[in-house]
Image (cartoon, grey):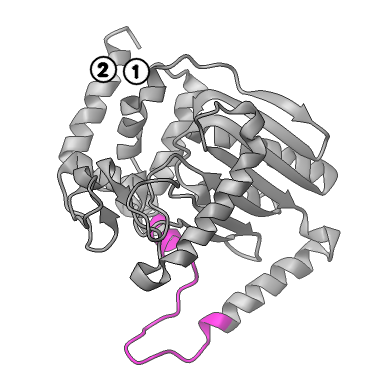
């Protein structure tokens, strides 16, 4: 990423983000994401320094300065940790950034600092509203992070029937997407990733329950609009962190034990036939991370070659 023009600290933030995604088993959010950055039209637009626009202590409005989201959201998460630690709680909003990566990454980062966090994203149009045939909403994820007596409990879910990053990944490799998750430009169901990129994804919930995903997505849009005063008029993007200290209400150790006890109770629930284990959200990714830190990760050859070509931009200039 230094070959793409990022400084050492920025490149470190980007590398750590995508490597963690790869370790957790999210291939499409891993190393291929770096190629999505340099392919994005906003990558070629001028960047400004990350800055504070409004500051009331506990509430902060940030301008991402057209920096990619994996950098800007990392700075915003650091701000959320600092302000919540100082004030007990914080509301941090951000605009003028793009391609933020995995929301779970930031929620885990904040939860490890001993904070409860809710993170929302209003993303560019890629998803049709329930009953519609053209994109009007983003994939608009919502994520939560909770400190426990062990690993943080992190819940991260998109409001679309298929993830936008996975769609880009499959389009890059020429792979198909599942039935029932996307429409082409004419509003016809498609399994062609390229046609879906030009058309629209559907909200989660299927043909009868898609209004649930649509409703959540619209809520993410409404929260993203908190930053509308500093974003371009044609933009619908915006990010929010709401973070607070559990010891505003009870001792921190008691809270950690309470969440851990709830998880243990849920996992001990009698299981349906054929179900070997009740898995808590994020548990699979944590197990994959432990395994892959020992065994390593696999990467598609095409992605590997493209990343090497990108790196040569740095190496060819004496880096």
Residue 171, quarter of the rendered image: top left
In the image, the segment drawn in magenta is: 266-289
The residue lying toward the viewer, choosing from 295 and 18, is 18
The answer to which of marks 2 and 1 sits earlier in the sequence is 1
Q: Which mark is residue 3?
A: 1
Which residue is denoted by mark 2 in the rendering? 312
- Can you give x and y, in whole percent of width and height, for residue 236 in the image? 52, 37
Residue 184 seen in render: yes
Q: Is residue 184 found left or right of 74 in the rendered image?
A: left
Q: Which mark is residue 24?
A: none
Quadrant of the image for the C terminus? top left
Residue at image coords 16%, 39%: 301
- Can you give x and y, in whole percent of width and height, for residue 275 in the image? 36, 85
Quadrant of the image for the N terminus? top left
**Marks 2 and 1: CB-CB under 8 Å?**
yes
The magenta stretch spans residue 244: no
Secondary structure of the residue carrying tag 1 is: loop
- Can you give x and y, in whole percent of width and height, for residue 159 in the image? 46, 57
Q: CA distance from mark 2 to mark 1?
A: 6 Å
Secondary structure of the residue carrying tag 2 is: helix
- Can you give x and y, in whole percent of width and height, for residue 87 in the image? 84, 44
Picture layout, residue 192 above or below residue 231 = below
């Amino acid at each position: 990423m230094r070959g793409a023009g990022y400084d050492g600290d920025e490149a470190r933030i980007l590398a750590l983000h995508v490597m963690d995604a790869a370790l957790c088993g999210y291939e499409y959010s891993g190393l291929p994401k770096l190629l999505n950055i340099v392919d994005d039209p906003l990558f070629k637009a001028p960047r400004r320094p990350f800055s504070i626009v409004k500051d009331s202590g506990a509430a902060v409005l940030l301008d991402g300065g057209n920096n990619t989201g994996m950098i800007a959201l990392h700075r915003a998460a650091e701000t959320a940790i600092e302000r919540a630690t100082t004030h007990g709680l914080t509301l941090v909003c951000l605009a003028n950034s793009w391609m933020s990566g995995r929301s779970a990454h930031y929620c885990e980062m904040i939860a490890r600092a001993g904070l409860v966090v809710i993170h929302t994203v209003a993303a560019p149009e890629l998803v049709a509203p329930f009953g519609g045939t053209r994109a009007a909403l983003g994939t608009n994820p919502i994520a939560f992070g909770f400190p426990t007596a062990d690993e943080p409990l992190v819940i991260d879910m998109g409001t679309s029937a298929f993830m936008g990053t996975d769609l880009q990944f499959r389009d890059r490799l020429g792979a198909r997407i599942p039935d029932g998750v996307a429409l082409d430009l004419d509003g016809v169901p498609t399994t062609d990733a390229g046609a879906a990129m030009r058309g629209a994804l559907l909200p989660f919930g299927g043909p009868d329950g898609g209004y649930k995903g649509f409703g959540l997505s619209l809520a993410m849009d409404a929260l993203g609009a908190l930053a509308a005063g500093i974003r371009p008029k044609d933009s619908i993007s915006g990010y929010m962190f709401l973070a607070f200290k559990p010891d505003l209400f009870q001792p921190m150790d008691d809270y950690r034990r309470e969440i851990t006890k709830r998880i243990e109770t849920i996992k001990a629930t009698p299981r349906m036939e054929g179900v070997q284990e009740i898995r808590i959200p994020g548990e699979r990714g944590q197990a994959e991370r432990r395994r892959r830190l020992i065994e390593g990760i696999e990467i598609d050859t095409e992605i590997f070659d493209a990343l090497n070509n990108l790196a040569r931009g740095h190496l060819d200039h004496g880096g």
